[in-house]
Amino acid sequence: MCGIFGCILRTGEAASTIHEGLKKLEYRGYDSVGIATLQGSQLFIKKDSGKIDSVHAIHNLEALPGRLGIGHTRWATHGAPYKENAHPHTDCNNQVAVVHNGIIENFAELKTELEESGHVFRSKTDTEVIPHLIEEKLKEGLSLVDAVREAVKRLEGSYAIAVISVKEPNRIICARKESPLVLGIADDSLYVASDIPAFLSKTNKSVIVQDGELVVLSDKGYEIRNVIDWKLVTREPEVIDWAPEMAAKQGYPHFMLKEIHEQPLRLRDTLRLQDKYLELMTTFLDRAGEVFLVACGTSYHACLAASYLFSKLSFLATHPVIASEFVEQHGKSVNIDSLLLVVSQSGETADTLDAVESARLRAATILGLTNVVGSTLTRVARVYIVQQSGPEIGVAATKTFTSQLSVLSQLAIRLAKKRGKVSHVEIEELEENLERIPDIVEGIISGSEEKVKQLAKKYRDRCCFFFLGRGMGSAVAQEGKLKLMEISYIPSLAYPAGESKHGPISLIESGFPVVFVCPKDSTHKSIIGNIMEMKARGASIIAIIEKGDEEIKKLADDYIEIDTKLPEVLSPIPFVIPLQLLAYYMALERKCDPDMPRNLAKSVTVK
Ligand code: F6R
């Protein structure tokens, strides 16, 4: 997730406006920053790695001439956060400059093709194929607009781009597929950005660019066309009445809620990982003598779910381990045949890195799954995958958890395929179902939010909660408990439901809330038994169920029904959504700040 910005001013210098706009987009990423402007037929570029303020302190980003330009603040996906990977990227002759937010899935094929026809690449990014594709089309004699149109037709994946060129120095061409892009319309200036706050101090009139559209900004105004049929699109600007604070959160009251709602988008991005890294990791997993899944907190819950996935799908036994216990528990036995699949959103968690260090000293193989390119985990791992969630600002992990689950599911499915443990038909079904998950999650958020709000009102004064699940549902129960506890400060417990009768059930008395995670899988009958046990002792049962689960509806005091129709191994992603919402609305009911829970930090870099 990166931030892009562009503007055409009637008077004044564009660079200072772009700098200001990028500052508003810095929440989208801050690995590097760059600005390109045009004056006459000359292109000027400044870019470097680092946060906007530090790059500005060195290079003075505002010292670029021209009243038209584009800029970018980067969240690294392809290519480390170095200067040469910073946007804008240019073609071979520095005539075209491009900023991009998104992931070009077929960049490797396009790059090979372009290199074969003589193009020289300077970065490791997927983005750089775009200016070279445009250059090719310009060479064929196309106008800039047509060249951009033809180039985007070749792109697979997601993108919001802004393009300028010395060939037509009075225009910015933009296009969008799946990554956000909005226009800002003022009397004497035009803006394009990833997000409205970037230009809100200049104008409150905005046009949302839709998927598959290309926009030409010029002194004459803006023109939107459909890339495929080239039909003109007429769309009047809307007036945006957000306060600046709300704008950064895109109108949501908290980052946590914004990030919960962002999950369908992020899950789609997570399905666009580079094949070669998934394949490489699968090979390492297949060959390892023993596999540990190592992480803390929410990332550990993703590991817990993954241990079921690897076992059920790939017939691989794995050991999920809480990172802070790893050295004590396994430090002496780890050896050259051991493999650690280490999961850390930040890639900087001290306990996790400590486990990695001790295992590395004993020659174990380290694989990393993280959200932050350039983090310590990416430097120490033999192979790493970046989960593509974009920056998570709310302290409680939400979108990064579901993205982790998606990547781990992809790995388990690949490993199953490699090992020939699951039929081709089943693999295809699983892959199709993974593709459906973003839409399913969208439906769950919109379908359950109101009901969850009511539940939060009803249960807000309870002093303790129980979360129970079986099989993969027990990992979801753990995560539901952590979310509720950490942001609304209600002491909570989670157990595999079968274990609850070996002690914890003694807590139950009339009205004690017990949240059950109930996918319709092989554990369904047993979970009904556990519900009965709790009910018989007066517990209030809150069940997360599959749509149409009449049996549990009859038993539960309250239920959230979700429509998934997914195979059991893919159930954790949809089932955790209502629990994230429950934690959020419970925090609001109890007047707690969900974005900044007390005593917690987003990245725990102390042991
Ligand atoms: C809970 C939460 C924490 C983190 C944990 C590990 O909402 O965010 O439990 O999951 O601190 O952090 P990473 O994944 O960055 O290693």
Image (cartoon, rainbow, N blue to C red):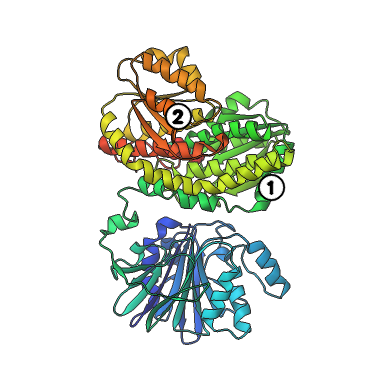
Task: Determine if residue 390 is in view.
Answer: no
Residue 390 as seen in the image, left or right of residue 537:
right
Q: Are marks 2 and 1 in contact (CB under 8 Å)?
A: no
- Residue at the spot 64% in from the left edge and 39% down from the top edge: 412
Q: Which residue is mark 1?
A: 279
Viewer-nearest residue: 92 or 466: 466
Q: Which residue is mark 2?
A: 517
The disc labelled 2 sits on which kind of residue?
A: Val
Residue at 68% in and 42% down: 425
Q: Give how far across and how far down residue 458 sits, in percent.
A: 26, 30
Asked if 156 appears above or below 581 in the picture, the reply is below
The answer to which quarter of the image holds residue 152 is bottom right
Sequence-first tag of 2 and 1: 1
- The x, y position of residue 8, in whole percent, is 39, 78
The kind of secondary structure element at disc 1 is helix
Is the C-beta of the residue carrying label 1 under 8 Å from the nearest atom of ligand 1?
A: no
- Rendering quarter of residue 416: top right
User: How far, Cα to Cα, is label 2 from label 1?
Assistant: 32 Å
Q: Residue at x 48, y 51 (%)?
A: 266
The residue lying at 33 percent from left, 73 percent from top is 185
